[in-house]
Image (spheres, rainbow, N blue to C red):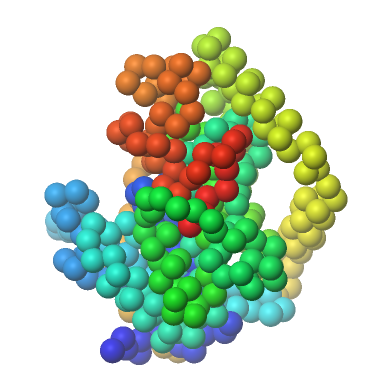
Amino acid sequence: MIELEGVPELIDPVMVAAFEGWNDAGDAASTAVGHLNREWKGEVFAALDAEDYYDFQVNRPTVWLEDGARRITWPTTRLSVVRVGGEKPRDLVLVRGIEPSMRWRSFCNEILGFAHELGVEMIVILGALLGDTPHTRPVPVSGVTSDPDLARTMDLEETKYEGPTGIVGILQEACTHAGVPTVSLWAAVPHYVSQPPNPKATLALLNRLEDLLGLRIPLGELPEDARAWQLGVDQLAAEDSEVAEYVQTLEEARDTAELPEASGEAIAREFERCLRRRDVGGPGQAPGPVAESGDVPYLRDTSGGRTRPPRPPRPDRAEGGRPGKDGPGSARPGGDGSGEKDGPDDPAAGPGGGPPAE
């Protein structure tokens, strides 16, 4: 039995989850949930028992100092709640963690238990995969679901994927079988520049989440970080003629593939997004944390919230090769160079890596 005595009653809650690891190329998805938690000042109210789901030789705990005392941060999955302000406030339950090493079914059941107790109306899982997409073009973001009715009503793709999957695919299917409406949003990260961070992919996921939920998300420095990231990759690509030629090939393929799809729909989505941002800072529009809106404080987990320092982006060269020679699909999801194929659930169906299925 899950007891959440420290959490007040939520308003139209939606759960947003992301997991580091195989489903998180460039750390784009987990960074997006971290951004939501930071901008809306979320308070951690629960954490899964690390002993149940993680192999500490694979995901090692870290030691750090606080006021001269040594502390340990255990790899786990933490939940927090934030309130989105505005004329119609609502709550987001944020789930951020690491893909578990074992007992995935029990892991998903715990997440679903929290969703049930909190009255969550829908679960959105964020993911990122490696794809044949140029860094100079907008990041493709696909929205998929296993629910045919949800696919029709929310203009999503119904998953048809068959093959190896990660915790995103497992959790999505567990939610579907439990009758919880679930959507996964996937950003395609250029496989030739897969090292984290990737603020451009993170920004694309947040924009798609805005469209899906009808929210206005404060973006902070993300747009500027995305521009700086692209400029840095541009400069690195310009120093290598083969990389530049390969990027141009991807650009041409992407532009050709997307030309027939150019329509007023994308323009309308961008226009609606701009309208949501017109009143930033206006009366009654500033988002705030749930913890400040009631008398009951959240249970604080002081071991959470630490982040890794960012690493500068540079084009990957798998086993000493070059993009164009190694070819698309030579890098592993997350860019650790193990030689596994693009993306956890990626059918590699053309420019942009194709829509993931789970």
Q: Is any part of residue 197 visible from this angle?
A: no
Q: Is any part of residue 352 visible from this angle?
A: yes
**Residue pictured at 73% horizontal, 30% vertical:** 256
Above or below: residue 237 compared with residue 74:
above
Return the residue found at the far right.
264
Q: Number of labelled discs?
A: 0
> x, y percentage for residue 205?
57, 52
**85 on left or right of 171:** right
The quarter of the displayed image where residue 85 is located: bottom right
Above or below: residue 203 compared with residue 305:
above
Q: Nearer the viewer, residue 211 or 356?
A: 356
> x, y percentage for residue 126?
49, 57
> x, y percentage for residue 339?
33, 32
**341 on left or right of 138:** left
**Residue pictured at 60% horizontal, 52% vertical:** 142
Above or below: residue 177 compared with residue 68:
below
The quarter of the displayed image where residue 274 is located: bottom right
Q: Nearer the viewer, residue 124 or 288?
A: 124
> x, y percentage for residue 244?
58, 16
Q: Nearer the viewer, residue 179 or 277?
A: 179
**Residue pictured at 34% horizontal, 17% vertical:** 320
**Residue pictured at 56% horizontal, 39% vertical:** 349
Above or below: residue 295 compared with residue 253:
below
Q: Which quarter of the figure is the N terminus placed in?
A: bottom left
**268 on left or right of 238:** right
